[in-house]
Amino acid sequence: MQYNYRVTFRTSQLTTLRGAILEDAVPSTARHGTARGLPLKEVLEYVMPELNIHCLRLALNSPKVSEQLLKLDEQGLSFQHKVGVLYCKAGQSTEEEMYNNQSAGPALDEFLDLLGQRVKLKGFTKYRAQLDNRTDSTGTYSLYTTYKDYELMFHVSTLLPYTPNNRQQLLRKRHIGNDIVTIVFQEPGTLPFTPKNIRSHFQHVFVIVKVHNPCTENVCYSVAVSRSKDVPLFGPPIPKAVTFPKSAVFRDFLLAKVINGENAAHKSEKFRAMATRTRQEYLRDLAENFVSTATIDSAVKFSFITLGAKKKEKAKPRKDAHLFSVGAITWSVTARDFGQSADVDCLLGVSNEFIILIEEQSKNVVFNCSCRDVIGWTSGIISIKIFYERGECVMLSAQDGCEEDIREMVQRLEIVTRGCETSEMTLRRNALCQLGFHVNFEGIVADVEAFGFAWKAGLRQGSRLVEICKVAVATLTHEQMIDLLRTSTTVKVVIIQPHDDGDTEGEVHLCCVIGDGRRGPSVLCYRRQKERSICVVL
């Protein structure tokens, strides 16, 4: 029996580090493979040698500890969003003008009916976004909707209380001015919108929706976005010079844009600083109010000390035990971006289910596929090509020329995939200038002439051609493939031998993720047990 130790490492940084390590990979004075497992102190010392283990104290056995940890982990996760809606009439552009529109016009009513449903606030039990559901002090009705797993409550300016003779309309601004995302609805004839007219510390994203031909069969909407400088780009992208007809598709597009806008705003410096302070308070509360006096090794039973006894040495971990981990193992690699003919520094992660590439500079995932889709690889001294699905390929090289990294990558792929090392062959022609085999449109060998040159070279039925004369088969049509085989003087092929069951296809479950080519890679493809958990809080 082997334990797989899961380690969760929480600090004041917003990213929680999670990992796993097999018992065999940990040097220990205790015997491996027992029901008791290894001393947690030794596991932590091996995983985080820079950590002062002696300062750690065990948490109290209280449900409040789990609740507090859950709050930490769900800090950046929200399925409830509040969104402001400002109404801009013809000839208007300033904040005061929009807040002082006492009631909605027909065009706004039509848009609100598309966006969500009007709900009576008194007695409303769902997400209310700080609106009063008892005394109607924040209005009688509001606009509410759901989108996938999300709840959205809209602070519509014309549904919030109007105060006569008050240009600032503070009862309205108190809510909308504290919304991160605001929809600015413009009637025909409005002046151009500029966020400089809005005075707020919280409004970071404005989605400007302008109506055309309102209240007719030809009604449509144009959309633009204004965001603070430190808010990153977010999708879905808005097509250029496109108007959206009134439809459920437009509604879904707009709601996705709003939700993504708020998520992007939380990555800005201001909101990250606020989130960090909140996280520090959670951690301080845990460290001060939810710990016992017991140290991490206080539960260890000590035997009687005998004079002259030797200190027990730690057993060496099994070599390459980490390669059998369930979680992802990572290497620093340089990936070839075929779209831009450039090299990209990435982290390669290989778990028992997925392979991913993360661009180091942007932290974006630029490639992923299922381990079930990997069909083979070609490994060199400091480089490797991984073939997947129908013969597409990612080309990687080890940073700093580390040969050991390539060896580990190959071993890991052998453990978690059904793929194998490719073979390179030089094929000869017979007296009729034929190669002696047939291949289908996917590059799979359908038939081989018995005892011919191709057969003698090792080509067998079911083998898959992935490269012909250094050209990727995945980039060729069937006609181009046949033409290349017929006309090349010397035919060198890279093949993947069939499995013992004759299968060379594999299952297609997941495609690669490709960047937009402007801000990042475009990228990286030819084409189309028993567990123990350890929680460390610092």
Image (cartoon, helix red, strand yellow):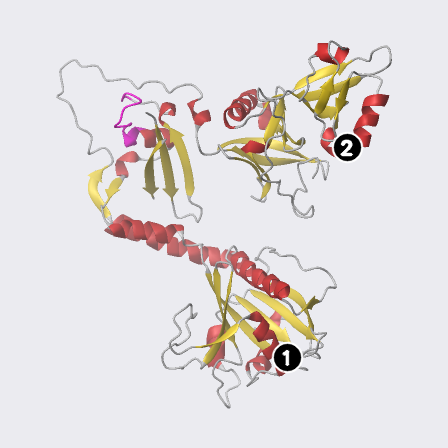
Name the quarter where the C terminus is drawn: top left
Q: Name the foreground residue: 240 vs 420.
A: 420
Majority secondary structure in the magenta region = loop
Q: In the image, is 312 to the left or to the right of 522?
A: left
Q: Residue 204: x percent and y percent? A: 55, 64
> Which label sits on residue 107?
1
The magenta stretch spans which residues? 29-42
Q: Residue at x 17, y 28 (%)?
A: 301
Label 2, on which residue? 476
224 vs 119: above or below: above
Q: Give, as a three-letter code, the residue at label 2.
A: Leu
Q: Residue 16: x percent and y percent? A: 42, 44
Residue 104 visible in the displayed image: yes
Q: In the image, is 220 to the left or to the right of 19?
A: right
Q: CA distance from mark 2 to mark 1?
A: 53 Å
Q: Residue at x 68, y 17 (%)?
A: 460
Q: Name the foreground residue: 382 vs 422.
A: 422
Residue 94 visible in the displayed image: no
Q: Residue 142: x percent and y percent? A: 48, 76
Name the image quarter holding residue 361: top right
Q: In the image, is 31 to the left or to the right of 434?
A: left
325 vs 199: above or below: above
Q: Give, as a three-letter code, the residue at label 1.
A: Ala
Q: Name the foreground residue: 463 vs 18.
A: 463
